[in-house]
Structure formats: C-alpha cells, structure tokens
Amino acid sequence: MPISSAAQTTHFDAETPLLDDVVHGSVDFKGRPVTRPGSGGWKSAAFIIGVEVAERFAYYGISSNLINYLTGPLGQSTATAAENVNVWSGTASLLPLLGAFVADSFLGRYWTIIFASGLYILGLGFLSLSAALYSFKSSDCQNAANKTACSPPEFQIIIFFLSLYLVALAQGGHKPCVQAFGADQFDEQDPKECKAKSSFFNWWYFSMCAGVLVALFGLNYIQDNLSWGLGFGIPCIIMCLALIIFLLGTATYRFSIQSDERNPFVRIGQVFLNAAKNWRTTPAAIYKEEEAQGILPYEGSQQFKFLNKALLSPDGSKEDGKVCSITEIEEAKAVLRLIPIWITCLGYAIVFSQSSTLFTKQGVTMDRSITSSFQIPAASLQSFVSLAIVVFIPIYDCILVPVARAITKKPSGITMLQRIGTGIFLSFLSMVIAALVERKRLKTAVEYGLVDMPKATVPMSVWWLLPQYLLFGIADVFTMIGLQEFFYDQVPSELKSIGLALYLSIFGIGSFLSSFLISVVEKATSGPARDSWFSDNLNRAHIDYFYWLLTGLSAAAFVAYLYFAKSYIYNRRNSL
C-alpha cells in the first residue's frame, strides 16, 4: 500500500530513528519511517511467502485435476474439456495485467492482496459448494439408465464456471502483487539486502513449488478417491488461514512512499503521445533542446531516439504536462525495451504448456506399474517438474551463484538475461528428448503389434519420460525465476506489479498460442485417408512430429532472444 509523503511527515517527529538505519523511500503501515533491523527483509518476506505457498496450493489444487472434473462429474468430452482448461488457464494468466493496474494506480499492493484473497475465498467456497451439491446426487447418477440423468443441472454448471472465473480474477489481483510486495521488503540501496533480494526470487519459487507438490499428491488423491467437494474445500480453508497469516505480518512490512508526480501510466503515455505529435521534428531541434537542458550523452541515449521528440511541446508551450522530462522519456524507453524480450520468450511459454497436456497423454499409454498392484497416475508425473525445482534451487543458490559471483563479481552471479537464456536452451533440449522418447514409444508399439490397440499398455516404462520432466524443472529454475526478477527490476519503480503481470502474461498468451497451434496442425494433418498428428489412437498419432515442430520453434525463438538480449541496455547499473 503506497503511503503519501504528507503522511510520512506527520509521524516523523514522533519517533526519529538513527539515520543510518532508516530505509529511505519506505514507511510502516502507519506512515512512520522504518528502520532496517525492525522491518522488511526475510522477517517480512516469510509472511508473504507463506501466503504465496497457500495460493499456489489452492490454484494447482484446481488446475492440475480440472480436466478430470470436467470430463467426469460435469460429463464434458475430452476436446471440450481441454478447450475449457486452456481458455481458463490463459485468462488466469492475463488477468494479472488488470490486477497490477488496479494495484499500481489505485489500491496499492497491500490492499489489493487483501481484496484478492477475499475473492479467492469466495470463489473457492462456491466451487466446493457446487461440487458438494453434485456429490449428493452421485448415487442416482450411477444407477441411472441413461447419460442424461447423470448430467448435472444447468444451474450447477453455471455456478461452477462463475466460481472458476472468480478464482481466475482473484489470482489476477493476488499473483503480481504478492511477489512485488515481497520484493519491496528488500532495500536495493543496501548491498546486503540487494543480494538477499536476488535470493528471495529463488526461495520464493522454491516455496511455491513445495505447495504445488503437496497439491499434486494430496489434493489430487482426495479429489479422485474421496470427494471433489472436500478436494475443493480444503484450498478454501487454507486461503482463509493464509489471509490471517498475511495480516499478522502487517506491523513488519515496508510500504513504498507514493510519489507526488502524475500517475505513471499517464506519464509514460504522454511521452508516446508527444513523440507522435512531434513526428516532423528534426534531429537538429532535438539536439538543440538537449543542449539547452544540459542533457549529456549516456549509455542508451541513442536507443529509441524518436522518443526524445517528447522533450518538445507539440504546440510550443512550456506548461506543465505539455513537455516531458528526460526521466519520463527514460521510463518510456525502459518499458519499450521489454517488448522484444517478452515476444521472444513466447516460444518458451508454448513449450512450457506441453508438460500438463501431451506429456501426460504419453504417460497414459506406457507401463506405469510401481508394484504389482499399484500404478502411478499419469498426471502425477507433473510433480517431477516441481520436484526438480525444489532440489535444484538450493544447488543453484548455495553453490552455482557463489561460484559465479566469485568469477563475474556480480551480486547475482550471472545477469538476469543470461539466466533466462540458459533456461530457454534447456527447454529446447527437453523437446528434443521428448521427441526421441515418443519415437521410441511408437516403435515399441509397432514391434509388439499394438498399433491398432489404443487402450493396450505399451511395454515401455513410464520412467523414460522422467528426463524431459526433470529438464523442464531445471529450465524453470533459470527462466521462470529469471523472468520474475527481470520484469520486476526493469520497470519503473511505481510499476513493479505491472512488471510481474507482464511476466505472467507471457504464459497466458503462450497457452492461447499452444491451443491455436494444435488446432492448426490438427486441421492440416487430418483427412479421410490418414490419421492426424493428434489422433485419439496415440499409437497411430505423431506427437513426435509436433515435438520436432516445437523444437524448431524453440530454436528460432532462442536465436532471436540472443540477438535482442545482447543489445539490451539495463535501466539500472546494479542489474548488470
């Protein structure tokens, strides 16, 4: 929650801490200056991380098994259910743009988190109620003579989907603000806290994945074997506890001081508007104005030079709001520099979406026996992505970063863009492995005469899929966390939530693009005399071809990423 400068001044005389301990630019909940030992840091971050663990537990408790609920109790076809899951997932990843805008422009991160948590609890409550109402009629459904009697009433379906999208809306407000608010607890001007902030993003993701693991193992079992109502109700209870924990930490939080300047969206928008109006302005006129204002050449000053036209007023007036400052122009340039990175990471997002869909479809056809009487559920293989993250993050943070830091002399060991690029390359390798494994599965099906037996188990261990899942997890440690830190760090200080929302939107758009790509390939490869790449009979399908297509797409995106990353100019020296 941003606090006004006036509120800070009102309380300043009540208690004046030592200047060396004061965290500049931050106040406490009551608007008083905060000291380094008594606020922020890991003390405050622990409360906020706890809230994130609960939120991810709730979100994945729904999303990881949603397709089974849609095809089971709601009676949808696999194609319809898959479409609904993709649309909901994509929407949930794009709504943080709205939530971040509300937080950065109106409510502040603290109050947005509280309101979003309330919406989360409301949505989960209605979701569990909808599932519980159906469970009361499940015995009638099992005894019904026709499928129509098994279908839930239309009112229940409406309540379910309204609740589902209420959860997506709540996630839109919760996700960007919680992480940005957590990172706000570390002072970038203090060398020790600056290092801790880099570690914060690592341990944030570690804790988040721990919550996901519990959801994948615990909640999925409850939903499949006990009750869907209980499986949706437990996340509701957990979110209630999380809200209480978040409120308990209020006294320790640092709140950024709200600037007296114009709204950041208005400032940046004005730069583009003025530059567009001055499109006829000559370079000589811009140079003359820069010289008059004493603006010296600096790193990046020649990049997006056309925006410097905003230094001049469109109508020649010098009134406030008519002319943009060089600081405002640099803010606009910082946002513009993010666009090529955002676009080139879409290839990674498309590949990322496969782990919960096609990888799972591969696993269903393979030998999943653990013992003679127990088979591992195919969907549970996704847990190995989270497991790889949980195992590798301590290795990365405690071993790789200190070694890299000693070599490069950088606080984070390697730059954020180097970290992101490493993950993109690992995801490329993961798709190569996935294509080779799928090719071997198809050959095994041919060798054992199972091509026309889609429900038969192919005598090939499901553990062949383990390398691609584990490599996906390790890639996430580099790219996902790198993207979080990059988009938080590189946007103007008043747009931190928007920065994290931009990172999340990569995966929302990636989910939509993945669905679109599958639809195009399905239409292009299907026909009356041939099976499509996504045939219902996977032994006749060619998912391996699709994996090779994604491999080529990933390689092209990686090359483009390297080009733009090499020329990227960080907007703060401590980001290098």
Image: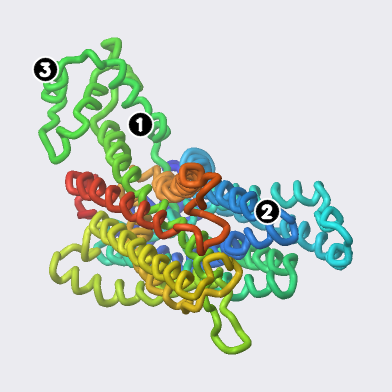
Look at the numbered disc 2 and give the secondary structure of its residue: loop
Q: Do callouts 1 and 3 mark residues in contact (Cβ within 8 Å)?
A: no
Q: Quadrant of residue 186?
A: bottom left
As shown in the figure, which amino acid type bears the numbered disc 1? Ile
Instruction: Give the foreground label among 2 and 1.
Output: 2
Say few, some or many: other residues with alpha carbon within 10 Å of mark 3 (under 14 / 14 to 19 / 20 or more). Answer: few
Look at the numbered disc 1 and give the secondary structure of its residue: helix
User: What percent of the width, then of the height, locates residue 351?
Assistant: 40, 55
Look at the numbered disc 3 and give the secondary structure of its residue: helix
The residue indicated by pointer 3 is 284
Q: Residue at the spot x=32%, y=25% of the render?
A: 272
The foreground one among 180 and 291 is 180
The alpha-carbon separation of the residues under discs 2 and 3 comes to 65 Å
Q: Residue at the spot x=70%, y=49% of the render?
A: 161
Say few, some or many: other residues with alpha carbon within 10 Å of mark 1 (under 14 / 14 to 19 / 20 or more). Answer: many
Image-based side of 361 in relation to 346, left or right: right
Instruction: Give the foreground label among 2 and 3.
Output: 2
Q: Residue at the spot x=55%, y=45% of the render?
A: 528
As shown in the figure, which amino acid type bears the numbered disc 3? Ala
Image-based side of 429 in relation to 158, left or right: left
User: What percent of the width, then of the height, locates residue 535?
Assistant: 54, 55
Single out the residue that lies furthest toward the top.
315
Q: Do callouts 2 and 3 mark residues in contact (Cβ within 8 Å)?
A: no
Mark seen at residue 268: 1
Counting residues from the start of the chain, the first of labels 2 and 3 encountered is: 2
User: What percent of the width, then of the height, locates residue 356?
Assistant: 51, 61
| Residue 56 is at least partly visible in this image | yes
Say few, some or many: other residues with alpha carbon within 10 Å of mark 2 (under 14 / 14 to 19 / 20 or more). Answer: few
The alpha-carbon separation of the residues under discs 1 and 3 comes to 24 Å
Mark seen at residue 77: 2
Q: Quadrant of residue 184?
A: bottom left
